[in-house]
Structure formats: C-alpha cells, structure tokens
Image (tube, helix red, strand yellow):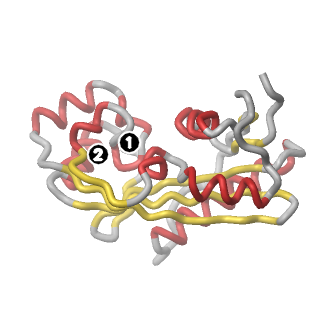
C-alpha cells in the first residue's frame, strides 16, 4: 500500500472511496466546523465556504496537501442538509419527488499553490416517490447522514430519473475538477491504494 499523499478533511466514506477510485491514498482528519448557512448566503457561496473552512481546519494536523469538500442539495432556493429525523427525511423526499433539484459540491485543496477551489452544479430529476417508498427508504438507514436525505449511489438510485452534470459530484466529490486541483498542487494520482 502506498503512503498517503493527501489529507482528506472529511469523515465521508464516499469521498474516501472516490479518491481511492482515482488512485489517491489519503489520511483522514475530519474537522468539526459550524455548518450553519449565513444570512442571505447563496448555496454556491455556502458550499465553497465550508469546503475551504474544512481544509483550513485540518492544516495544523498534517504536512500533506489537504482536501475539503461540501455538498448541498438545493430546491426552490432552499439548502437541504442532513435530515435530523425520520419526519425531516420524509419531508425532504416529498419535496424532491417528481421534480428537478440542484446538487452543488465544492472542493478545496490547499498546498504549494495556496488554496484552490472549484464548485460544480448538477441537475437531478427525481421520479414521483410514493408515501410507502418514503417510509421504506428511511427504514433502510441510508438517508440519515446524506444531504437532501438520499444517496444517489445507493438504494435511492431507483428514484433518479435523470442527471445533467457530474454523477461523482452528487455522490460527494467531482472527480474531474478534483483531479485538476490535485494536479495543480502536485498531488499524484493513479497510485496503488
């Protein structure tokens, strides 16, 4: 196994798996930051601010380049975070049912070139989701820790009618943009992970 070449400032197993899929071995140092949106803050500004804040918060703990990222599901201008409970999770799925929404994912990488960042917006269209499906999906446990209350790479894939944009960004890390930022910071890809 190759030594880590990057610090991932996130506890997300999905982000770690996505980085592994492009051969980037990481060490993980999740950072606890306040994720409350600021008053009148746009969704893009919100995810970019959090991605940078996560990367900055991990700086005292590593000498490696650091990657921070954040994802938000947005519908009708409203940022949907992780559902607090079954009622909130059901409300989110009902809101997304039969509609198109945006998923914004920002990535920030600190390193020799300073702090570099990018934000990707993907359009996701859901089919109609029945009330029984909403309840059954929550019971799987999958949506509890996911922005917008669903995981496109998991069981909720059956709800997704169409996407326009980056699938990996909806999962949690836009690989095209991430690779570009990593290369600019001198982080090698395609290592044995």
Residue at (36, 44) in percent of width and height: 83
Q: Quadrant of residue 122?
A: bottom left
Horizontally, is 48 left or right of 56 in the view?
left
- For label 2, the SS is helix
Residue 144 horizontal/vertical position (percent):
38, 35
Q: Nearer the viewer, residue 75 or 37?
A: 75
Residue 76 horizontal/vertical position (percent):
28, 69
Q: Quadrant of the C terminus?
A: top right
Residue at (56, 32) in percent of width and height: 13
| Residue under pointer 1 | 84
- For label 1, the SS is loop
Q: Are marks 1 and 2 in contact (CB under 8 Å)?
A: yes
Real-space Cα separation, disc 1 to disc 2, in angstroms: 6 Å
Residue 117 horizontal/vertical position (percent):
66, 65
Q: Which mark, by number, is residue 88? A: 2
Q: Nearer the viewer, residue 125 or 34?
A: 125
Report the label total: 2
Q: Which mark, by number, is residue 74? A: none
Residue at (82, 53) in percent of width and height: 186
Residue at (34, 27) in percent of width and height: 141
């Amino acid at each position: 196994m190759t030594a880590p070449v990057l610090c991932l400032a996130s506890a997300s197993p999905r982000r770690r798996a996505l980085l592994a899929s492009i051969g980037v071995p990481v060490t993980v140092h999740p950072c606890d930051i306040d994720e409350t949106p600021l008053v009148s803050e746009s969704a893009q500004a919100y995810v970019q601010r959090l991605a940078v804040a996560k990367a900055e918060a991990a700086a005292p703990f590593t000498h490696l380049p650091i990657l921070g990222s954040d994802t938000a599901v947005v519908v009708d201008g409203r940022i949907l975070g992780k559902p607090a409970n079954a009622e909130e999770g059901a409300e989110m799925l009902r809101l997304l049912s039969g509609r198109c929404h945006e998923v914004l994912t920002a990535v920030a990488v600190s390193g020799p070139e300073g702090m570099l960042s990018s934000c990707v917006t993907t359009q996701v269209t859901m089919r109609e989701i029945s009330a029984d499906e909403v309840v059954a999906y929550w019971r799987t446990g999958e949506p509890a820790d996911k922005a917008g209350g669903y995981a496109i790479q998991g069981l909720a894939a059956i709800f997704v009618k169409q996407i326009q944009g980056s699938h990996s960004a909806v999962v949690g890390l836009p690989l095209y943009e991430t690779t570009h930022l990593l290369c600019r910071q001198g982080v090698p890809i395609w290592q044995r992970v």
